[in-house]
């Protein structure tokens, strides 16, 4: 049951992204500061299925604003930040700019590699960790790099002010790729990240087929065959989150490599949205999310946006939702 719950959660996340996609305009051109230029992508595992990057520097600057400090939770956050500094020697408010996370394996047995990059001093961090962890940390050398083995993880400093931490086998594979420098990205990942702004507060890309092929989703697949077939056509999806003047903007981009199939995926999802909005008994929250979403498509891409802004909520408030009454024939049948 617990395994099924994990699969259902993953499916809901995937469907939530896909449900953002509705419309007919052209996809925006590639951004000059696109996410595929991230220098941390050189550590990308070959068998990745999720990669996400977090602009820690921007978030920490927002937290130092006076209005943020008025939040009752701010004092507790400061305590956590101070504990992290004592344990690692890193001041998260000043010393960390970017955090990049890679996931391999399956949704049930995930392996994670994290890249932390900023302005901290590697030697200071290594000494602080040694003092904090004592005998529970050991050192070994691998291809001229020191690997610190922690409980359930490995850690190394591959370059200045950079930490690799996670599954030790992934740390070693990342070190193996260093002599070759930046490696070409997989085609589908390159396609979506080339159109994903690299300066977003957070962006992510994932391969939906990894989730869709999980054995634990067999029952869901049987009950949603058409949706499953449509989603399987999408090779890679990127999602980015950014702050606007009055709220949060979420955008998603799917790459469909088969010629002409992006249009059919778009048409299927558009029809599915219309059916959901007119379905009697539809969940009010899900219906609201659909109303706030819109989609664009061009060539092999399907692009969607989702707005959590003051203007969007005003439009939602003014939207009239009609619940269809039961037909006389249906009422008679129920009796």
Image (spheres, rainbow, N blue to C red):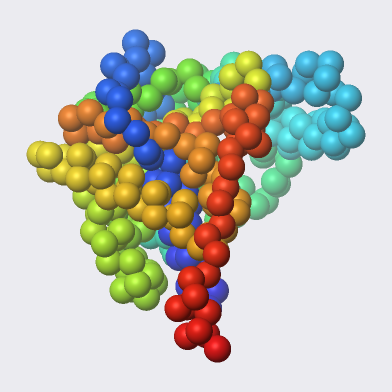
Residue 101's spot in the image, x, y percent? 47, 39
Residue at 48 percent across and 71 percent down: it is 327
On the question of residue 261 being in view, the answer is yes
Q: Left of 314 or right of it: where is 236?
A: left
Residue at 38 percent across and 13 percent down: it is 33
Q: Which quadrant of the figure contains the C terminus?
A: bottom right
On the question of residue 115 being in view, the answer is no
Which residue is nearer to you in this view: 155 or 278? 278
The image quadrant that residue 181 belongs to is top left
Residue 83's spot in the image, x, y percent? 79, 36
Residue furthest bottom as drawn: 335
How many numbered discs, if any?
Answer: 0
Residue at 34 percent across and 40 percent down: it is 237
Residue 251's spot in the image, x, y percent? 44, 31
* For residue 182, above or below residue 235: above
The image quadrant that residue 201 belongs to is top right
Which residue is nearer to you in this view: 263 or 180? 263
Q: Left of 309 or right of it: where is 277?
A: left
Which residue is nearer to you in this view: 20 or 48? 20
Residue at 41 percent across and 26 percent down: it is 40
Residue furthest left as drawn: 259
Residue furthest top as drawn: 32
């Amino acid at each position: 049951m617990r395994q099924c719950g994990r699969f259902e959660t993953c499916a809901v996340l995937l469907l939530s992204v896909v449900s953002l996609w509705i419309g007919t305009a052209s996809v925006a051109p590639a951004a000059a500061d696109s996410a595929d230029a991230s220098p941390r992508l050189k550590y990308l595992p070959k068998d990745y299925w999720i990669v996400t990057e977090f602009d820690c520097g921007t978030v920490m600057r927002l937290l130092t604003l006076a209005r943020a400090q008025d939040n009752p939770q701010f004092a507790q956050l400061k305590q956590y930040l101070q504990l992290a500094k004592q344990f690692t020697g890193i001041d998260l408010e000043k010393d960390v700019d970017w955090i990049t996370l890679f996931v391999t394996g399956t949704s049930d047995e995930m392996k994670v590699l994290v890249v932390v990059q900023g302005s901290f001093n590697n030697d200071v961090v290594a000494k602080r960790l040694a003092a904090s962890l004592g005998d529970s940390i050991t050192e070994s050398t691998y291809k001229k790099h020191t690997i610190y083995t922690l409980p359930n993880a490995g850690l190394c400093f591959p370059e200045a002010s950079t930490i690799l931490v996670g599954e030790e086998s992934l740390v070693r594979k990342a070190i193996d790729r260093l002599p070759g420098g930046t490696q070409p990205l997989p085609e589908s990942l390159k396609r979506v990240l080339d159109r994903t702004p690299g300066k977003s507060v957070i962006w992510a890309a994932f391969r939906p087929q990894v989730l869709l092929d999980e054995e634990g989703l067999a029952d869901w697949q049987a009950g949603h065959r058409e949706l499953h077939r449509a989603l399987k056509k999408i090779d890679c999806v990127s999602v980015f989150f950014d702050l606007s003047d009055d709220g949060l903007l979420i955008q998603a981009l799917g790459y469909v490599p088969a010629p002409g199939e992006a249009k059919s995926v778009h048409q299927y999802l558009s029809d599915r949205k219309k059916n959901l909005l007119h379905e009697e008994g539809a969940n009010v929250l899900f219906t609201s999310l659909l109303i706030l979403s819109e989609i664009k498509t061009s060539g092999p891409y399907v692009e969607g946006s989702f707005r959590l802004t003051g203007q969007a909520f005003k439009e939602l408030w003014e939207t009239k939702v009609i619940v269809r009454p039961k037909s006389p024939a249906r009422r008679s049948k129920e009796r």
